[in-house]
Structures are given as C-alpha cells and as structure tokens.
Amino acid sequence: MEGALAFTSWRGVVGVIKPTMRPGSLEEMIRILPEGIGVIPLFLEFQRGSRKEFDRGIEQYEPLLEKLAEKQVDLLHPEGAPPFMVAGHKRELELIEGWEKKFKIPVFTSGTNHIRALKALGIQRFVAASYFTGEINNAFANYFTDVGFDVLALDGIDVAFDDVGSLSSEVVYAHVKKTFLKHREKAEGIYLLGSGWRVLNIIDTLEEDLGVPVIHPVPARVWEIQRRLSVNQPVKGYGRLLAEMIPD
C-alpha cells in the first residue's frame, strides 16, 4: 500500500539495562519474545559479582534509564537481580516509584518480576540455586523472606563470575535436583537466580522430573513484558509460566 511503512515494533518497545557486557540472556530473550515487540538494550559493566560492587551499582542505572526514556519506549526494565536484592525490597520499590514518577513510563526490576512470577504460580515455599557463594546468598534469601516467602534453601555453585556462561546445563540440573530432593516434601517450586547461566534447555526437564514449576529469569522476563504490553502469546519449551501465560 502506497505510503505505508513497515513498523517492526507494533506491539510495543521495552528498554532494558543489562548489568554485564556478556552475551547470552539478551539473545535468549529476543528469540523468545513474540514478533512485534522491540528491544532497546543498554549495558552496565559489573565484572566481579561482589556485594560491594552491587551496593555501588544501583546509582549507575538512572542515567541509562533516562537515555531509554528519551527514546519513548513503552516499558523500562533495569535488569540484574543482585543489585536490587542486596538493597532490599523496600529500597527497590522506592527506586521504581521515583523512576516512574520521573520518566512517566512503567518500570519493573528482575526482583519484582520474580516475586510476581512466584505468586502467579502459587509458590510460597521454594528452593533456589545461584552462581554465587557465601554470605551474599543469605541476602538474596532475605529479600524473599522479607516479602513473605519461605526459602527452604539457596545453594550456590562455586564458579568464577566471568565463567558462569560456561557452566554446563547438566551440571546445573544435577545441582538443582540435589537441593530440591532434600526439601521435596515442602518445596512448591524451584527458583534459578541470575541470567548468566545458559540453562534454558533444562527448565522443562526439571519441571517434568521433579513435578514443580521452575522460575528462570529469562522466561519470567518475557512473561512480564507480555503482561505489561497486553500481549498474550504462550511460548512452549521454557516452563509452565510462559507456556501457559499464567495470569496473575
């Protein structure tokens, strides 16, 4: 039709801030998102994965959110669960409220996304796995207990922050299964913290073998982006949350 222009982001555009400059989860998200949803990514440069780095990192988000807001995106998503989790849910909500007031655009974080996904699936008690070790896992667990969840275990895999993407999905499967089986009488779900590991291929397998839903950041992100943009396109292969587009 004369005068008509192709509009590839006709369902909406989300501006995302990736916490690290490494490949993986951005490509995974874009491949899973329905046709017609556009993505504008910007990047931070977290390199060590330490609590000190995360504590200082919160202030780095706002300038990038401002850049994305200037592009008139429909949705803002500052990614990275750890920086907001160590700050605590109360501080996280204060930041979101401030950003939404300033930019006049809806904002969600990884942490609030994971809370929403857990609630949508009816999960109150869960086991979790991360690619962090030591005290910081307690901070992650406290983030969820502070809003009423029961974290039965949050077990980390000892791997260098830069090497997370090289972890085999089979190793992660075995780690998660071992943790779950210790709490199988109480656990209602499994939560995988962090987008750095490349384990989308084991989500369905874990759900089938262990009989509970699995929350992984990438499918959970795609699920919420769809919900926020009033899109409802189930995507199979990445767990029940996205396969059924569970309402909340």
Image: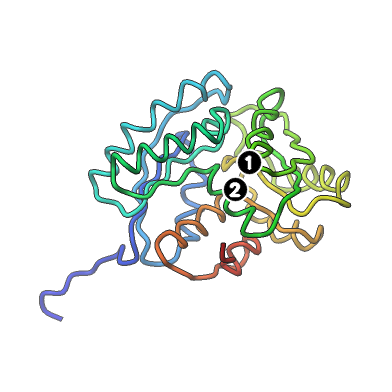
Asked whether 104 or 8 is in front, the reply is: 104
Q: Position of residue 201 (x, y in %)?
A: 66, 56
Residue 77's image quarter?
A: top left
Q: Is residue 157 above or below residue 219?
A: above
- Image-based side of 52 in relation to 119, left or right: left
User: Are there few (<14), some (14-19), or many (20+) residues within 10 Å of tag 1?
Assistant: few
Q: Is residue 164 above or below residue 214?
A: above
Instruction: Please report contact status of discs 1 and 2: CB closer than 8 Å, yes or no.
Output: yes
Report the Cα–Cα distance between label 1 and label 2: 9 Å
The residue shown at (74%, 53%) is 189
The residue shown at (53%, 49%) is 113
Q: Secondary structure at mark 2?
A: helix
- Chosen colour scheme: rainbow
Q: Mark number for residue 147? A: 1
- Image-based side of 140 in relation to 37, left or right: right
- First reached walking from the N terminus: tag 1 or tag 2: 2
User: Disc 2 designates what residue?
Assistant: 115
Residue kind at label 2, given as amino acid type: Ile
User: Are there few (<14), some (14-19), or many (20+) residues within 10 Å of tag 2?
Assistant: some
Which label sits in the foreground, 1 or 2? 1
Q: Secondary structure at mark 1?
A: loop
Q: Position of residue 59 (x, y in %)?
A: 40, 26
Q: Position of residue 190 (x, y in %)?
A: 73, 50
- Image-based side of 151 in relation to 241, left or right: right
Q: Position of residue 119 (x, y in %)?
A: 63, 55
Residue 102's image quarter?
A: top left
